[in-house]
Image: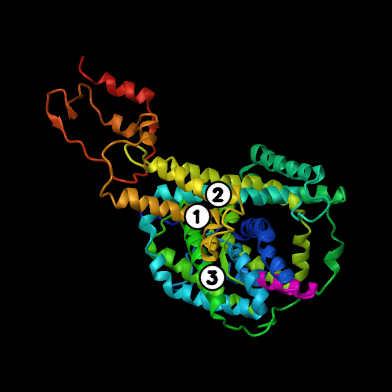
Amino acid sequence: MASNSIGNSSQPRPEDKNLGLGANLAYGLQHVLTMYGGIIAVPLILGQAAGLSSNDIGLLITASLFAGGLATILQTVGLPFFGCRLPLVQGVSFSGVATMVAIVGNGGMEAVLGAVMAASLIGLLITPLFSRITKFFPPLVTGIVITTIGLTLMPVAARWAMGGNSNAPEFGSMANIELAALTLVIVLLLSKVGSASISRLSILLAMIIGTAIAYCLGMTDFSKVSEGPFLAFPTVFHFGYPTFQIAAIISMFIVIMVTLVETSADILAVGEIIETKVDSRRLGDGLRADMLSSLIAPVFGSFTQSAFAQNVGLVAVTGVKSRYVVATGGLFLVTLGLLPVMGRVVAAVPASVLGGAGIVLFGTVAASGIRTLSKVDYRNNMNLIIVATSIGFGMIPIASPTFYDHFPTWFATIFHSGISSAAIMAIALNLVFNHLTAGNSDQQSVFVAGTERTLRYQDIALLHDGDYFLNGKLYDKNGIEVPVVAPELHTSTAPVQSRASGIAVAASHPG
């Protein structure tokens, strides 16, 4: 039922290690810089759709930073029944943007806030159901989801590298792309020639160096940092008291369902990456924290909260597993929510610098998923076609964003996210082929037959001199039959390519 567990349960968990104040501050700031562009995107889009003034849009951004910081602290530090206590950064979920834009056009910002609160309350009540699905997330499913998360985020990195704002005249210019490429090269150089500490901070250092280069080239502007208030506290219900419209609540509840699926995937993914145990209780605590944060966020003028997949990638690429690092990042977010001047400093980081770093971050997520998929047993089963179909299904909205435009709204809301598309398909196919085995053919499919023959090294190591196979049975050198145990489904042992392994077995055959 766990996504992964290592060693004895009495051993200290890797996420509980406290690296000290200096490391927490440095790595925590790196997490904030990684997700800052994403967390301000939603309030920017919604504020413009609602026709808000620039000052009110700034308040939306401040509220989102503040609420994201509180949600991150709750998720990482935790309270009884709330918080998975894993290194997960929380922020405004992007999956509900289209739905909220539609609601704001009909009922205003008050209807959006009311729909988020009501749908989040329903989501909080149904989390016990979602917390029991971990047995349906073996390495086969988690590997598919992690891989899809990385692939889904690559278009974000590409847009950042091109300049971020597609309406700007310099979007896609060679200057932006060259700055992104230079940032990427700096990340790689620091990872190669630096010490372990420098390597772990390579993303942050590359962003600082890239921003400094951009400033020297006139590609970023810090003049607006001094504009606006230095200190600003979030105002309760600044945009009016929430109104509750049935249609808006139903639409937002579909978004909440998607958020629960994606958050479940992120919790299990980060558990797999840092190699710690994630059982149904821990998953439930994480989902409850997600829903409670989403329920409270509208009070300050923010929206649904969810784990940020790009920060899962940062955990993978740096190897820093401590949840206290991410909790420190949450404190940074709260501070940014109280100090708009700090937010304006971070906002001055060019999008193309973020794009150069994002290629490494998001690519690392996909690579982590591929590593997880390498642990799956593909022998004499349908796991290969499950992987192929699920990832292909998840790539549809990435390859063709308008693919679901003519589908029912509720269907398009769910499957417009490549992550939820791949997760739903992987869970469904795993159930059909590996749990509901009635009706499965005893003949190999063309996909299984087309794969290279593999044997596990540990199986070969158990053979003794003189062992041989005869009529499908294994015998020792004295002719005594050796029991052969049927393989369990979803084994997490990685097979070894076996042209050489096959020779080793053949050598033990008589004659």
Residue appearing at x 76%, y 44% in the figure: 177
Residue appearing at x 34%, y 44% in the figure: 491
Residue 5 visible to an observer of this rendering: no
- Name the amino acid, label 3: Leu
Q: Which residue is mark 2?
A: 396
> Gap between marks 1 and 3, in whole Å?
28 Å
* Picture layout, residue 472 above or below residue 282: above
Q: Earlier in the sequence, mark 2 or mark 1?
A: 2
Q: Position of residue 419 (x, y in %)?
A: 52, 54
Q: Earlier in the sequence, mark 1 or mark 3?
A: 3
- The numbered mark at residue 421 is 1
Residue appearing at x 65%, y 49% in the figure: 155
Q: Earlier in the sequence, mark 3 or mark 2?
A: 3
- The answer to which of 193 and 509 lies nearer the viewer is 509
> Gap between marks 2 and 1, in whole Å?
9 Å
* Picture layout, residue 454 above or below residue 363: above
- Residue 60: in magenta span: yes
Is the residue under label 3 in contact with that under label 1 (CB below 8 Å)? no
Query: In what element is the residue under mark 3?
Result: helix
Location of residue 90 (image quadrant): bottom right
- Residue 3: in magenta span: no
- Magenta residues span 50-64
Is the residue under label 1 in contact with that under label 2 (CB below 8 Å)? yes
- Name the amino acid, label 1: Ser
Location of residue 300 (image quadrant): bottom right
Q: Which residue is mark 3?
A: 74
Q: Position of residue 489 (x, y in %)?
A: 31, 46
Quadrant in the picture for the N terminus: bottom left
The prevailing secondary structure element of the residues shown in magenta is helix
Q: Position of residue 476 (x, y in %)?
A: 16, 26
